[in-house]
Amino acid sequence: MRWRFLPVILFACQDDTRNLEPQNLPEPTCPALFALPAPRCLAPWSETFGEAPQTALLDSRAEKLLYPRPGGVVTVNLLDQNSTSEPIEHPAVELATTPDFSAFATILAQGEIHDIYWWGNNSGYLHTLAEPWRADGHRVPLDNLRLSGNGKYLFFSTSADSFLIPDTNLLHDVYRLTLATSKLERISLGAAETDGPAYGARTHWNGDKVWFISTAISLGARFIGEGDVFFWENGEVKPAGFEERNVTGLEVSANGCVVITETANGLVIRDADQQSEIIGQRPVLAPSGRYLTYLNAQRRPVVREISTGAEAPLDVDGVTGATQALSFSADDGYLTAVGYGPTCPRPVYDELGQCQNCNCRLQGLYVMRNPLLPNPCNSP
């Protein structure tokens, strides 16, 4: 399979995510986005729910965990395992944050009404957008919330046409919001209105290069009704040049060096050194681009080191019920996962990947170490 590696801005290694300044480096070097000390030893953490949150985020060194609950956003200090809750009036349906937790954004839902708020640097909650409406009178949701790593841009998708005029296609579009100025741009826009939805925007650290999925023939999608990957930079959209058909998922590392596409047939991983294909679904990519978690052919969550292909099950330190990873810490050392509650029996799967004893009603949220890295708690 032929492929074309997209041009990216690369970054020099720094000592701390809080003081990163990007700079151009010659290709084909693709260094780590930032250098951090080795992962610290953390005591295992888990929480049991009737319904576990589907978003959970770790800061750069896995010192803090952020996840939404009805009526609040919970922050857990993983060093002392104390938690605090930031009360909010309506449920948070999505969360996004920068690796150092200096900026946050959330979509709050009140029935059919969705609003985006962001906060950071002690600025408090800021209402960023008017209520999303369509010309046909329907309120419509916002989704696919993402922050650029530097906290400058916020990305989301919606079919609302009340944000920018003209917007007449009544379809999902991808937007970029500059947080400092509230400038809003529709980036899934060609020479004319698109004739297919766009969604799933992913960006690297700076937020000035964006990949997204669209079925729009007017943008260059090759097959009617099937998603293609597109690339946006400097106001111009063009096909990314990937050969996969019917792309349903997309992940991009924070340094822009790894792009993963998902189809019904599995995952295709592109990085600066190689391209590989694996049978799996629901990818979660570490910001560094070094590690990936996904569900394998038996629908078991595994962690993969992209450069070597080494894999390990997401089953460490007594956690046996994880069914889906959610996020990595930026130092690669820890990740969040959801699954069956800690008191549920260990899942048993048949040859078709169907769980034979997964009738436990409790759900768990876990913070667990990367099984492909040495256990930091065993260091002398």
Image (cartoon, grey):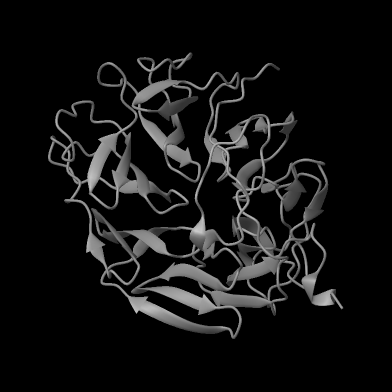
275 or 356: nearer the eye? 275
Instruction: Report the side of 15 relative to 190 (left or right).
Output: right
Position of residue 19 measured from the top left corner of the image (x, y, whole percent): 50, 59
62 or 348: nearer the eye? 62
Position of residue 17 measured from the top left corner of the image (x, y, whole percent): 54, 59
Q: How many marks?
A: 0
Q: Is residue 304 above or below residue 29?
A: below
Position of residue 224 measured from the top left corner of the image (x, y, whole percent): 43, 16
Instruction: Report the side of 368 relative to 131 (left or right).
Output: right
Q: Quadrant for residue 165, please give it.
A: top left
Residue at 28% in and 31% down = 171
If the image is split into quadrants, where does the N terminus sit? Answer: top right
Q: Is residue 52 above or below residue 350?
A: below
Residue at 69% in and 65% down = 37
Residue 99 seen by the camera: no
Residue 165 seen by the camera: yes
Instruction: Report the side of 201 relative to 380 (left or right).
Output: left
252 or 349: nearer the eye? 252
Q: Is residue 3 above or below residue 167?
A: above
Residue at 38% in and 18% down = 219
Q: Is residue 105 above or below residue 379?
A: above
If the image is split into quadrants, where does the C terminus sit? Answer: bottom right
Position of residue 376 measured from the top left corner of the image (x, y, whole percent): 78, 71
